[in-house]
Structure formats: structure tokens, C-alpha cells
Image: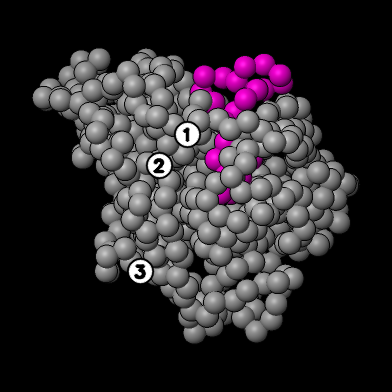
């Protein structure tokens, strides 16, 4: 790997983007920069697939979780320090129910401040995880952040000492959501260190479907990491600066599913529901089944489709989700089925493996009609948002992010066409507003763009039109690139629902 510049402060980083650091990111390169680990690469398909524990409420509708440092075995025989919700990576899965409000108290016992965002949640703005609305660690913190709690580092920064409550009304349809850290300038290293988990919303419409359930419903958080010789997470920056060689984004050389390297899952020759999440900082995926097979898509980022769709491959940019069914009865008992990523070579081209162990009774099915999604509203206006690298850095409409600097003021209860353009691969995520992809470069969107979404991959020099619905709450929200290194380097913008 080529030599890397020393860590830079954000201000120093942005100051050199017009010169050598911009070139270092690789003009014309449309993926992140690979960070080669130093630990021995584990043999794939030896570690059993773990399933994150389900969070238990401490009272009806109330949960408590503590962000803390823990040492866990990820690579066999080594211990890795993680920052985890509940000390686990991924964090516990929150099983939420439409129409049943939930309050989650997050206590911070980490050495750094945090802000938790429920990704895909229709949430009041004061519980949305705004990047300058932060929880200061209980009892203060040390290291590079000493004294942080005593000073404001960004205009309008709000501090909560030790813990805070996030209120989630859960008025939305059944969907696969996730939660993660969202603090200003430090989302990427915090998520890399382990601050992420699933949140599954369920409702009566979904309950009525004969989809695979119980042990045959698998949440699969796919991410990549690099490790030091001692098993520690490697990341190309300290907590005081960015490494300019990785401004395109950081990719790890070990693929993890639910925190395990290239795991294996024993399945019966029946249908399984796979809730797929690309939780990588920057790595894009194109998932296939080997030696062959199809995915039956039943849901997208933010809920069930109206009818199932069949796909040979699933392109996934960071933070996108697919809810799919795979019928393992199509494979002989004793055979193996590997989930692969065709956008990567070598070991990173594998994700995980399924072993078809035995036959079993299967009373599940995928009906021809799945749900009655929200109808499209007629748009009241069209707005344009350009995600581009300029001499200043990663920008939206030519601007570096400044908290409170509004780029739009849509009205509650309306829909707008948002035209997204790009010079690079930018997975664009919109808070609060769910949307449908209308067109790519003026043409029909891909079949894999179907459904109501909150993230869309805007590819190099592409124009993507989406229809965004502003439902739920008034207040300040965000749109940003979900390549987390781009997000930390100011590729965000605020909008206010009025």
C-alpha cells in the first residue's frame, strides 16, 4: 500500500483538497481506498453466523442501552476492542411495533461523545440524531477529547450529560431499519468501531403474510473491517484528524456478517427471509448466490413492496437494505450456497455461506400481493442537489456543511421531486422523508430501485430523480452522502419541514 499523509485536522484537510490530497483520492476511482490489515486472514466459512440479541424493554415501551467499550473475539484467537451499544457488535436488535411508541435511553460510557440516528425512522427532529446534538460520556472522558464537554465545538451544539432519551412514535410501516452513531465529523470511525445495530418495525399487514419467520428470518448486517496484528480495528486516522489518502472512503479487507468473518449458517431445505443491510463505510456490494439462484425481493429500505420481484443480483450501496426470500429447497441436501460480492476480488468477493443440512416441513410462501404501500402524491415542486467534489472538498450544491444552513424548506404533507446529481458514487440518504426512485438519467429506474426508500446510489455523472414524501413531523432534518468518510468531510445539508 502506498505511503499515506499524516493525519490532518478537518480544516487542514479541506485546505489541501485542491492539490495533492485531491489527486491521492483517485480521480476516476469510484470506490473507497482499501486499508490492508496486518492480522492473519481467517479461513472463511468456519465461524457460525451469530444473530444479534433482541433488546428487552425495562418497562412497556421503554428500553435502556449503554454504549461501552468491550473486548470481543472477532478474529479467531484474538481480542478486538469494540465500542458497542450494550458492549456488543452489532448492538441489540430493537423489535418495534407500528403504533406502539418506544423510548430508548442511551447512556454513554465511551471515551467520546455520541449521537444516535434511527436510520429510516419517521422521527421527531429532536430525536433524529442531529450531528451536533450529542451525549457527553458519563463522568467525562479522556484522550484527545479531554475538555470537550466544557466547550462548544460547533455552532448550536447541544450537550446531554451522560445519557438522553430518544423518542420514537413508530407510526410507520413494517420495515428493516438500523441505528448508528451520527456525530459531527466522527460518524465513520465510530461506526467502524462498532456503533450500529438493527431496528425491525413490524405491523399487522406483515403479520398476515405467510413469509418465513422465527429461525428462518435472518437479519444480516454486512460490513468490512481491517485488523492490526493484535486484533484491534485499524482505521486511517486518529480522532483529531482525517487521513487525506482515504478521502474516497475506507474499505476493509475482512468481510463481516453480524460481526463474524465470513460466517457459515446451517439451513434447512426451505425458504428463508434474509434482511440484508450494507453497513459498510464505503464499500459497495453486488450480491449473488453461487453456484446460482435467485432472490425474491419482498421489501426495500422502508417497507414491503406491493408485489414480489425476482432478481439474480442485488446492488447495494452503503446503508441500503433489501428484504428477500431465498428458497433453499432448490439445492440438494448437503450442498453449499455462497453469498458473493461480484464487485470485489479475492477473499472480499465472498460474504458468507449457507449449508443445506436437511429437509424440513415448510408452510411459508411468498404471496403475489404483499402490501398496500402509500400512494404517490403529486409533487408540488422540483429541487436539485448536486453531490460533488470541489476545491473546497466534498460538497452539496457547492457548499461544505454548516449546521443550520438550510438548502430547502418543504411543507409537511407534500411531496417534491428531488433531482440528485453526482461526480462519484454517492449513496444519498434523506432523513425523515421516504422516497421512490422515478428515473435514472431520464430513463426508467432499475427493478432493484423498487419500493419506498431512504437511500439511493447516485452513480458517477448520473441524474437520479426521486419523489420524496414529507410526512410525520416538522423540524430540521438532513440529507447527506452515506459514504461515511464523505459525510464526515462535510458532504451533508440541512432542510426544514415547515
Q: Secondary structure at mark 1?
A: loop
Residue position marked by numbered label 2 in the rendering: 173
* Position of residue 43 measured from the top left corner of the image (x, y, whole percent): 36, 38
N-terminal label among 3 and 2: 3
Residue 374's disc number: 1
Q: Which residue is mark 3?
A: 64
Q: Residue at x 52, y 19 (%)?
A: 447
Name the foreground residue: 56 vs 346. Answer: 56
SS class, disc 3:
strand
Residue 45 in which image quadrant: top left
Numbered disc 2: secondary structure: loop
Query: Do callouts 3 and 1 mark residues in contact (Cβ within 8 Å)?
Result: no
Mark closer to the chain start, 3 or 1: 3
The answer to whether any part of residue 106 appears in the image is: yes
Mark 3 residue crowding within 10 angstroms, few (<14) / some (14–19) / many (20+): some
Q: Is residue 423 left or right of residue 167?
A: right
**Relative image position of residue 205 (x, y in whole percent):** 31, 36
Q: What percent of the width, then of the height, locates residue 433?
A: 57, 44
Among numbered discs 2 and 1, the one appearing first in the sequence: 2
Q: Taking 69 as reference, is 306 above or below it?
A: above
**Region rendered in magenta:** 428-449
Q: Is residue 47 magenta?
A: no
Q: Residue at x 60, y 20 (%)?
A: 445
Give the number of the mark in front: 3 or 2.
2
Left or right position of 283 against 491: left
Which is closer to the viewer, label 3 or label 1?
1
Amino acid at each position: 500500500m502506498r505511503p499515506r499523509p499524516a493525519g490532518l485536522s478537518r480544516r487542514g484537510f479541506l485546505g489541501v483538497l485542491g492539490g495533492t490530497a485531491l489527486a491521492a483520492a483517485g480521480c476516476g476511482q469510484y470506490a473507497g481506498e482499501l486499508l490492508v490489515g496486518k492480522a492473519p486472514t481467517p479461513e472463511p466459512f468456519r465461524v457460525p453466523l451469530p444473530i444479534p440479541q433482541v433488546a428487552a424493554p425495562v418497562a412497556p415501551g421503554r428500553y435502556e442501552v449503554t454504549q461501552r467499550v468491550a473486548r470481543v473475539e472477532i478474529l479467531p484467537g484474538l481480542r478486538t476492542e469494540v465500542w458497542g451499544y450494550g458492549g456488543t457488535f452489532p448492538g441489540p436488535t430493537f423489535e418495534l411495533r407500528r403504533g406502539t411508541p418506544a423510548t430508548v435511553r442511551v447512556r454513554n460510557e465511551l471515551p467520546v461523545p455520541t449521537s444516535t440516528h434511527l436510520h429510516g425512522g419517521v422521527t421527531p427532529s429532536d430525536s433524529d440524531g442531529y450531528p451536533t446534538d450529542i451525549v457527553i460520556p458519563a463522568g467525562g472522558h479522556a484522550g484527545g477529547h479531554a475538555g470537550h464537554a466544557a466547550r462548544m465545538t460547533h455552532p448550536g451544539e447541544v450537550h446531554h450529560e451522560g445519557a438522553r432519551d430518544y423518542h420514537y412514535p413508530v407510526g410507520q410501516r413494517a420495515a428493516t431499519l438500523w441505528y448508528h452513531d451520527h456525530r459531527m465529523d466522527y460518524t465513520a470511525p465510530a461506526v467502524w468501531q462498532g456503533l450500529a445495530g438493527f431496528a425491525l418495525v413490524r405491523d399487522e399487514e406483515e403479520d398476515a403474510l405467510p413469509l418465513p419467520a422465527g429461525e428462518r428470518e435472518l437479519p444480516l448486517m454486512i460490513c468490512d473491517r481491517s485488523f492490526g496484528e493484535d486484533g484491534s480495528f485499524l482505521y486511517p486516522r486518529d480522532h483529531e484528524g482525517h487521513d487525506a489518502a482515504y478521502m474516497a472512503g475506507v474499505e476493509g479487507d475482512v468481510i463481516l456478517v453480524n460481526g463474524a468473518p465470513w460466517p457459515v449458517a446451517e439451513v434447512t431445505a426451505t425458504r428463508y427471509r434474509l434482511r440484508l443491510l450494507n453497513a459498510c463505510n464505503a464499500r459497495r456490494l453486488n450480491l449473488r448466490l453461487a453456484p446460482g439462484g435467485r432472490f425474491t425481493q419482498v421489501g426495500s429500505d422502508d417497507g414491503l413492496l406491493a408485489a414480489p420481484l425476482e432478481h439474480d443480483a442485488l446492488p447495494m450501496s452503503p446503508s441500503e437494505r433489501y428484504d428477500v426470500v431465498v428458497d433453499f429447497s432448490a439445492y440438494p441436501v448437503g450442498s453449499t450456497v455462497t453469498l458473493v460480492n461480484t464487485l470485489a476480488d479475492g477473499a472480499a468477493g465472498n460474504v458468507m455461506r449457507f449449508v443445506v443440512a436437511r429437509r424440513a416441513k415448510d408452510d411459508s410462501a411468498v404471496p403475489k400481493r404483499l402490501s398496500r404501500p402509500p400512494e404517490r402524491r403529486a409533487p408540488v415542486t422540483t429541487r436539485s442537489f448536486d453531490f460533488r467534489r470541489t476545491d473546497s472538498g466534498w460538497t452539496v450544491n457547492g457548499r461544505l456543511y454548516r449546521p443550520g444552513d438550510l438548502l430547502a424548506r418543504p411543507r409537511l404533507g407534500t411531496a417534491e421531486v428531488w433531482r440528485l446529481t453526482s461526480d462519484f458514487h454517492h449513496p444519498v440518504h434523506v432523513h425523515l422523508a421516504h422516497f421512490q426512485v422515478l428515473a435514472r438519467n431520464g430513463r426508467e429506474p432499475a427493478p432493484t430501485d423498487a419500493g419506498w426508500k431512504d437511500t439511493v446510489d447516485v452513480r458517477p455523472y448520473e441524474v437520479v430523480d426521486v419523489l420524496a414524501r414529507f410526512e410525520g413531523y416538522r423540524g430540521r432534518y438532513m440529507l447527506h452522502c452515506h459514504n461515511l468518510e464523505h459525510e464526515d468531510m462535510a458532504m451533508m445539508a440541512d432542510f426544514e419541514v415547515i
